Image (spheres, rainbow, N blue to C red):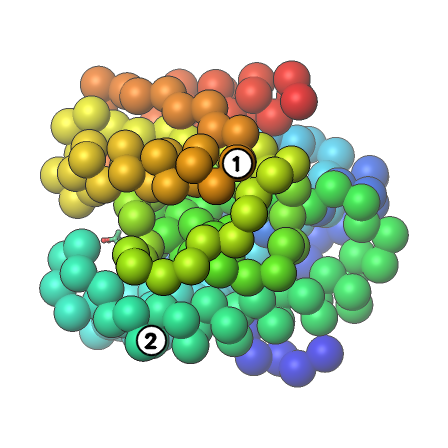
Amino acid sequence: MKETHHHIFIEGTNVKNVLILLHGTGGNEHDLVNIGKHIDPDASILGVRGNVLEGDMPRYFRRLSEGVFDEEDLFFRAQELHKFLKEALHHYAPKNEQISIIGYSNGANIAATLLMKHEKLADRAILFHAMVPYRNQEVRVLTNTQVFIGAGSNDPIIPQNETLELIDVLRSNHASVKDIWYNNGHQLTMNEVDDAQKWYASI
Ligand code: MLT
């Protein structure tokens, strides 16, 4: 396995379930561990840090300005991350049966790219505060992919129409999407995490 990304792996008591954790801008591989444990206390956890730096803030891909992505870099980084995740799952969790991706903000945006563009890694994704990562390019058929979307109706960084368009793209490509909206901004709240946990436990 090529160590292309800083990461942590925590083996769970149920080695069949693996949660891939992708942080928001300025975060790291440890950020979402408690959230992952809340969602599935028994699963193994693979937390991965983004390879791009904006100032001193790790991200998964470059942006030209807030909400305007460098598509070329997005596709390059998503490919690199996909390769790393595939190898890391094989290396750390060879008995995996159910892979879930949990992403927040920038991490949710690259998670959406992985779903939409790349060979299937995960059956489930929890996307907190996500937007449409790219337009005008092919999207994979997402049959049997379950997605939970948590969104803030007053999120100043992720406009509502961006999340609504993402939901539409996922649904029109046959993903099953549950979206819940909160009267909140960009911050990830415990209500959202609780709802994601209930959704995860129910499917
Ligand atoms: C992004 O750049 O992915 C979004 O604007 C969200 C963020 O700031 O991380």
Quarter occupied by the C terminus: top right
Check disc 1 and report the residue beneath it.
Answer: 174
Type of amino acid under label 2: Asp
Q: Considering only vertical position in the picture, is 71 above or below 46?
A: below
The residue that label 2 is drawn on is 73
The kind of secondary structure element at disc 1 is: loop
Answer few, some or many: residues within 10 Å of disc 1's Cα (few below 14, many 20 plus, some between 14 and 19).
Answer: some
Q: Quadrant of the N terminus?
A: bottom right
How packed mark 2 is, by other alpha carbons closer than 10 Å (few <14, some 14-19, many 20 or more), is some
Along the line of sight, the residue nearer the viewer: 92 or 173:
173
Which tag, 1 or 2, sits closer to the chain's start?
2
State which quadrant residue 170 falls in. top left
Residue 103 placement, left or right of 17: left
| Residue 12 percent coordinates (x, y) | 77, 43
**Compared with residue 22, is residue 176 higher up or lower down, i.e. above or below?**
above
x%, y% of residue 132? 30, 48
Which residue type carries mark 1?
Answer: His
